[in-house]
Image (cartoon, helix red, strand yellow):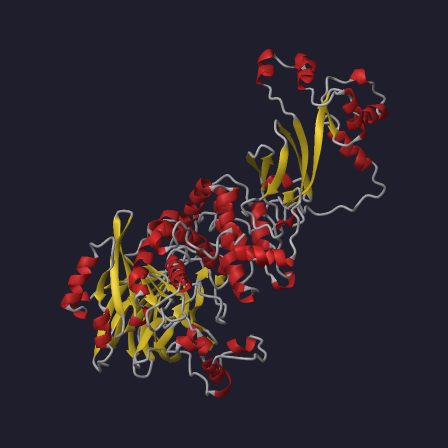
């Protein structure tokens, strides 16, 4: 091997091909994403920012809501003012009726294949096969204009088209009203996102959302987003202002999206005093409604009512929670130069776990997400305890995690509760503020949010070390690369690219949550580095807060703000189901000599050249080769002093003084059985016990997608080489990551080591 003839050797090999392969399209994994991306325009700029003509619609709501606690039914009347900020004339408006997913004539159950299972929950079995069926869905009493005239409307499953008498021109508003009611489902039976739980004493705890007809999004990307709600894909909603009056039994406590307008009317004097203390408490929550008070109220079953009045500005949705059995606590958290209230609402069944940790988790989450994105803009964030439930809305979310009847709980229950609170509170940022289309791109809210959740979990573990095991980090389930390996190594027939509509995605949790979160963590920790990644990620969040981004806006912004070309990463990680597998294929040991080796002799002879025609050259001889055996006899290998004298005419005395004296030369060949390029993180361990780590950028694979070689010149002999020693790249097969190759353990030995924790 010799450097001078490396290019010629490749050319010779090419010329020797007897048959030429046909030409092909550019299949290089590092080509740009022009084919996958749409062309930038005046609405969305090529740098990933909103364009000069970017627009979004606005939907403002005034609602009066009444809860019939005895019959678990909600009655509502709303007035919607819709502003057309688009350049288009609109002939009609589309309204979402998500509760119709539970209507008796719903087709949602019909799209799910099911078979006979050996066991099922009794409640589920009765509901499916023996009961009359839940009478769900919106019952629309009327749709009217501002003069009280009936408006023509057409209901198509979970969407309602409202036909306006005239075209709604750009810049104009249209106001109309809807009256409706529906039966609230028991969310503990059918895992509904919204509903009630019945407690042992007959009381109900309500977590209510998707409870009103909601405007669909109209955007520059696809016009009306009127894709039907089948149950999995979540929501696409415009921003607006809300005035909501909610009437519930007078012994209920209630919290909701928005700022409470009549606190003095609905709070007792003691509650008001406690609330004032909570606004100044930054370390510990202040209890607004105690457990004793909640348990006393649970016995009253009041027949009178009370109306709670809220206003919310610039939110995309609305939710509320209410019960007479709720405990309520709060504390303040400093975000930027503002105080935000971290709030928890929970029944006695949640204690002591919830009283100890929920509000502190909310506060810590707001700090972490604000650091990674933008300062949380709303005045509060509420965590509501709901059995087996995790769901998010602006300023409010439902979370699970319940001790047993004696108040005991395992670490699994504790960390499960903490993680779901972090995740659901984090959804205030993605997608409640950075308002992506969940109906189409599930990963843009769940995956991005799960990534920041991992960061926030680690922050929480550092802020509250007493909450985790001694000297341990918070035990995150998602984020680190090694946790996605089993999924990515799975059956390709059961995988889908991340860039797939959520409804049609196999392995929904892994694909929509874990894989995108892991990919972003790899970018942050391994490919870009935290500084570049965090700056770019904040840029994306701040560009698109209170707007509607697409995947391309995210991809383009991350590159625009970092000067890192990531097209290869987006394509492979997001658009394919390929996987990472990088290993050490071969290691050859070479020695240096000034004596011409056989390979070069053959090359110059083929060209009619003489040795005297060549400039001073350094030759590498592979250990064990014919040249090696001959040079061993003449003792001309690794004679560094002789080499320096041999090359002295080519270097100045100053250059020669800086010369190192490597004694060992290795050609290390890395291979890539997997498709996804990744940086090669190689750790070289020497016989003296020292080691060094070298990271070769992913672009090392740009000209050879199968294998690459690197020459290592070392003063010390290499004893071991390991690729990706810290499992940073989601490599699905680590058996090929070491040289010399590790001896493969038998099943019993593997099991024994696993038991030992090795």
Residue 651 position within the rendered picture, expressed as x and y whole percent measured from the top left = 63, 14
Residue 447 position within the rendered picture, expressed as x and y whole percent measured from the top left = 48, 57
In the image, 42 versus 541, the foreground residue is 541
Residue 122 visible somewhere in the drawing: yes
Q: Quadrant of the N terminus?
A: top right
In the image, 94 versus 717, the foreground residue is 717
In the rendered image of this protein, does residue 568 appear above or below residue 444? Answer: above
In the rendered image of this protein, does residue 183 appear above or below residue 548? Answer: below
In the rendered image of this protein, does residue 534 appear above or below residue 136? Answer: above
In the displayed structure image, the side of residue 230 where residue 34 appears, left or right: right
Residue visible at 51% across and 60% down in the picture? 512
Residue 313 visible somewhere in the drawing: no
> For the view shown, which residue lies furthest in the left direction?
269
Residue visible at 15% across and 62% down in the picture? 273
Residue 161 position within the rendered picture, expressed as x and y whole percent measured from the top left = 44, 72
In the displayed structure image, the side of residue 224 where residue 211 appears, left or right: left
Residue 366 position within the rendered picture, expressed as x and y whole percent measured from the top left = 34, 53
In the image, 48 versus 257, the foreground residue is 257
In the displayed structure image, the side of residue 549 where residue 344 appears, left or right: left
In the displayed structure image, the side of residue 348 where residue 435 appears, left or right: right
């Amino acid at each position: 091997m010799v450097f001078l003839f490396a290019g010629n050797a490749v050319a010779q090999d090419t010329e020797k091909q007897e048959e030429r392969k046909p030409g092909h399209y550019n299949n290089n994994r590092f080509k740009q994403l022009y084919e996958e991306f749409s062309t930038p325009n005046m609405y969305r700029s090529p740098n990933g920012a909103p364009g000069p003509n970017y627009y979004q619609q606005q939907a403002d709501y005034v609602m009066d809501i009444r809860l019939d606690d005895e019959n678990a039914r909600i009655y509502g009347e709303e007035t919607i003012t819709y502003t057309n900020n688009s350049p288009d004339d609109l002939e009609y408006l589309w309204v979402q009726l998500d509760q119709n997913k539970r209507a008796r004539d719903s087709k949602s159950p019909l799209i799910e294949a099911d078979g006979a299972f050996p066991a099922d929950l009794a409640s589920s079995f009765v509901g499916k096969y023996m009961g009359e069926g839940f009478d769900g869905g919106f019952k629309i009493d009327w749709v009217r204009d501002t003069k009280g005239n009936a408006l023509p409307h057409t209901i198509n499953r979970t969407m309602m088209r409202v036909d306006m008498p005239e075209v709604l021109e750009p810049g104009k508003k249209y106001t109309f009203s809807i009256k409706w009611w529906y039966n609230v489902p028991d969310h503990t039976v059918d895992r509904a996102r919204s509903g009630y739980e019945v407690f042992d004493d007959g009381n109900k705890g309500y977590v209510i959302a998707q409870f009103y007809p909601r405007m669909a999004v109209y955007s520059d990307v696809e016009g009306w987003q009127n894709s039907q709600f089948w149950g999995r894909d979540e929501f696409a909603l415009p921003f607006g202002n809300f005035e909501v009056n909610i009437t519930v039994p007078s012994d209920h406590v209630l919290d909701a999206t928005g700022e409470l307008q009549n606190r003095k009317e609905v709070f007792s004097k003691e509650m008001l005093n406690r609330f004032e203390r909570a606004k100044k408490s930054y370390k510990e929550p202040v209890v607004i409604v105690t457990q004793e008070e909640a348990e006393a109220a649970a016995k009253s079953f009041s027949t009178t009512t009370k109306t709670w009045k809220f206003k919310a500005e610039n939110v995309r949705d609305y939710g509320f929670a209410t019960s007479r059995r709720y405990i309520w606590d709060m504390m303040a958290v400093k975000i930027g130069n503002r105080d935000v209230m971290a709030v928890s609402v929970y029944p006695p069944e949640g204690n002591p776990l919830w009283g100890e940790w929920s509000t502190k988790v909310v506060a810590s989450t707001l700090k972490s997400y604000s650091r990674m994105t933008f300062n949380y803009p709303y005045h509060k964030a509420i965590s509501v305890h709901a059995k087996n439930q995790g769901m998010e809305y602006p300023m409010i979310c439902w979370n699970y995690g319940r001790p047993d009847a004696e108040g005991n709980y395992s670490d699994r229950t504790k960390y499960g509760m903490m993680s779901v609170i972090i995740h659901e509170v984090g959804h205030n940022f993605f997608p409640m503020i950075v308002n992506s289309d969940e109906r189409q791109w599930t990963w843009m809210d769940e995956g991005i949010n799960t990534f920041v959740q991992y960061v926030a979990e680690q922050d929480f573990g550092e802020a509250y070390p007493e909450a985790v095991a001694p000297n341990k980090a918070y035990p995150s389930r998602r984020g680190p690369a090694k946790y996605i390996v089993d999924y990515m190594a799975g059956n390709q027939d059961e995988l889908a690219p991340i860039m797939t509509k959520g409804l049609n995605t196999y392995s929904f949790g892994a694909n929509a949550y874990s894989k995108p979160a892991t990919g972003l963590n790899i970018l942050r920790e391994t490919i870009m580095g935290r500084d570049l990644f965090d700056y770019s990620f904040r840029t994306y969040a701040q560009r698109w807060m209170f707007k509607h981004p697409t995947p391309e806006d995210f991809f383009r912004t991350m590159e625009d703000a970092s000067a890192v070309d990531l097209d290869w990463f987006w394509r492979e990680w997001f658009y394919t189901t390929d996987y990472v597998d990088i290993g050490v294929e071969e290691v050859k040991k070479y020695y240096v000599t000034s004596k011409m080796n056989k390979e070069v002799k053959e090359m110059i002879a083929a060209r009619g050249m003489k040795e005297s025609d060549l400039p001073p050259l350094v030759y590498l001889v592979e250990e064990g080769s014919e040249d090696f055996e001959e040079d061993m006899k003449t003792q001309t290998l690794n004679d560094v002093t002789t080499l320096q004298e041999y090359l002295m005419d080519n270097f100045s005395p100053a250059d020669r003084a800086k010369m190192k004296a490597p004694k060992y030369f290795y050609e290390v060949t890395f291979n890539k059985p997997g498709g996804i390029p990744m940086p090669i993180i190689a750790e070289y361990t020497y016989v003296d016990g020292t080691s060094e780590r070298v990271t070769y950028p992913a672009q090392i694979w740009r000209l050879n997608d199968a294998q690459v070689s690197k020459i290592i010149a070392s003063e010390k002999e290499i004893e071991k080489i390991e690729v990706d020693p810290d499992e940073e790249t989601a490599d699905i097969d680590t058996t090929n990551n070491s040289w010399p190759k590790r001896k493969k353990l038998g099943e019993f030995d593997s099991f024994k080591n696993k038991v030992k924790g090795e």
